[in-house]
């Protein structure tokens, strides 16, 4: 029995003093398509088509600099990882790891920190110039520096909170509707099931969109430091 509404996100189950809920992150390794085929399978061909499309799109966002060759696959891998964890959270009795700030902040903070270190070490003048947008009046320059600095500092927080909040919101709504099934009259149960199916379709779309948004924003942040 739930002690509160947010207990569905509590990683409390453990076996031999080990929290087993977080192991759902590693189950995706079993779903990676095997490439040991003389003729590629349809599953592998689908993965390759999606990866190529994402590579072409991220390459346009990053730019054609020599140092960025192959860096798009970092963001493609992160998109696949977040997408897998978002979808796994839609199945019953599977822990939603992306609904926790521990998970999302662990993805966003190292990326943002590496971008900032790379930019300030290699492109210091450009990073200083980026604090004042072009065409800013002289009287507003000190305020724009403060605003741009704050906006850069909160980027990992906004990335992680956006992903976690969207995952929590849909799951809470489905949990609230699911708990009302015991007290509803029998004639309204088909309507409840229909609403739950529609919510599940919406959550599937949110799972795809949020993983794509996370990867695209990370790509844009990396392009700004070059």
Image (cartoon, rainbow, N blue to C red):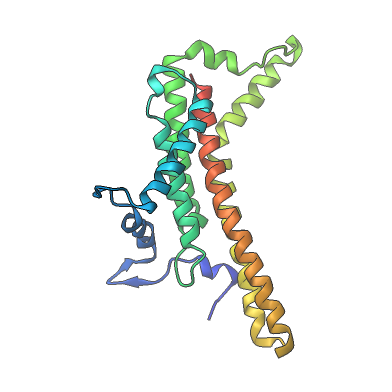
151 or 30, nearer to the observer: 30
Q: Is residue 140 left or right of residue 111?
A: right
Q: Residue shown at 65%/77% (left/top)?
A: 193
Is residue 195 among the parts visible in the rendering? Answer: yes
Is 136 located above or below residue 77 in the figure?
A: above
Residue extending farthest to the bottom is 186
Question: Residue 13's x, y, as percent?
Answer: 39, 72
5 or 178, nearer to the observer: 178
Q: Residue shown at 73%/84% (left/top)?
A: 188
Is 135 located above or below residue 212 in the figure?
A: above
Question: Residue 154's x, y, as percent?
Answer: 58, 36
Is 94 located above or below residue 191 in the figure?
A: above
Q: Residue shown at 45%/54% (left/top)?
A: 84
Q: Is residue 139 left or right of residue 221?
A: right
Is residue 102 among the parts visible in the rendering? Answer: no
Q: Is residue 151 left or right of residue 68?
A: right
212 or 153, nearer to the observer: 212
Question: Residue 20's x, y, as percent?
Answer: 35, 66
Image quadrant where residue 147 sits: top right
Image quadrant where residue 76 sits: top left
How many numbered badges does the structure rendering display? 0
Question: Residue 130's x, y, as percent?
Answer: 59, 17
């Amino acid at each position: 029995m739930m002690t509160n509404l947010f207990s569905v996100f509590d990683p409390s189950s453990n076996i031999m003093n080990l929290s087993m809920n977080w192991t759902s992150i590693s189950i995706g390794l079993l779903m990676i398509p095997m490439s040991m085929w003389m003729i590629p399978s349809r599953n592998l061909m689908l993965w390759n088509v999606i990866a190529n499309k994402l590579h072409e799109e991220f390459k346009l966002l990053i730019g054609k600099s020599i140092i960025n060759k192959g860096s798009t696959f970092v963001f493609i891998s992160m998109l696949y990882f977040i997408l897998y964890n978002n979808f796994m959270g839609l199945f019953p009795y599977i822990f939603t790891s992306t609904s926790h700030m521990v998970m999302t902040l662990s993805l966003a903070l190292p990326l943002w920190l590496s971008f900032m270190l790379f930019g300030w070490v290699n492109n210091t003048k450009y990073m200083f110039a980026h604090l004042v947008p072009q065409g800013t009046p002289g009287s507003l320059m000190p305020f724009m520096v403060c605003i741009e600095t704050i906006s850069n500092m909160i980027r990992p927080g906004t990335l992680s909170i956006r992903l976690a909040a969207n995952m929590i919101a849909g799951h809470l709504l489905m949990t609230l509707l699911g708990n009302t099934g015991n007290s509803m009259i029998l004639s309204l149960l088909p309507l409840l099931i229909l609403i739950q199916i529609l919510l599940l379709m919406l959550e599937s779309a949110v799972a795809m969109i949020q993983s794509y948004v996370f990867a695209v924003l990370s790509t844009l942040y990396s392009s700004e430091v070059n």
